[in-house]
Amino acid sequence: MIAWAWLMPAGTVLQAIIGGITVLTGLLWWTVAIHLLVSMLMVWLATVLFSKVSEPDDGVVVRTLPQPLRWLTALSGVTLAGVLIAGTMVTGAGPHAGDKSLDRPVPRLDIDITTLVHLHAELLVAYLALLVGLTFAVYAVHTTNAVKLRLKVVLALVVAQSSIGLVQFWTDVPALLVVLHVAGAGLCTAATAAVWAAGLIRTNAPDREPVTA
């Protein structure tokens, strides 16, 4: 618990350093991408910390999901990371640089944006497929209502996020939708982290066996 808590101020200091570098480079696309990705990592850590804080200090650690489903949950998190990385590359190659300088415009990512959009979308489909598979598997085993509810939430958020992304692509990426898409990325990250955190909990419930390995 203490280690999780210390990660937040440490991450904030790291973000301050990255933010300074981002400004000094004139909002160079890859520095902005790193800044966003570290923010998403902090969202994940904050969500897990919030879940841990609500658990009893003197309880036993129990696994609410079978180990294979824990691995599947972890794989969905890794796939989400790939989606986020591809998304920052789409932004880096897109029209919204964040820099208004006409004298010294900041270089953009020199890759065809359509190719990057397809990569981003394919990773998103893989992420959604893993979540759907995880949902079916969870309902086939004995687990907590918290896990089931959090899976429903993350599925709804991913579908909404996908819809925003499609509208962005069809409407030439309006700035307002970029803001909503970034916010949606944070919500999807938090929701996926909540599912991960619910798979291994500390509880006083006597009907579950403690984790011994």
Image (cartoon, rainbow, N blue to C red):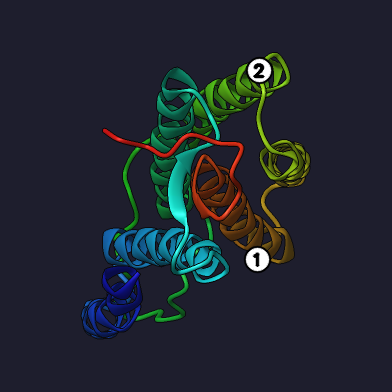
- x, y percentage for residue 87? 48, 45
- x, y percentage for residue 185? 58, 53
- Image quadrant in which the N terminus is located: bottom left
Residue at x 46%, y 23% (from the top left corner)? 72
Q: Is residue 167 visible?
A: no
Residue beneath label 1, please? 179
Residue at x 40%, y 79% (from the top left corner)? 102
Q: Say which label, 2 or 1, has the lower sequence index.
A: 2
Name the quadrant containing residue 54.
bottom right
Residue at x 28%, y 78% (from the top left corner)? 6
- x, y percentage for residue 140? 70, 13
Residue at x 52%, y 66% (from the top left corner)? 56
Residue beneath label 2, please? 141
Q: Is residue 196 visible?
A: yes
Name the quadrant containing residue 34.
bottom left
Q: Mark 2, mark 1: which one is toward the viewer?
A: 2
Question: As displayed, is residue 106 above or below residue 124?
Answer: below
- x, y percentage for residue 152? 77, 38
Q: Disc 1 residue type?
A: Val
**Residue nearest the observer in this picture, 106 or 175:** 175
**Residue nearest the observer in this picture, 137 or 120:** 137
Question: As displayed, is residue 120 above or below residue 54?
Answer: above
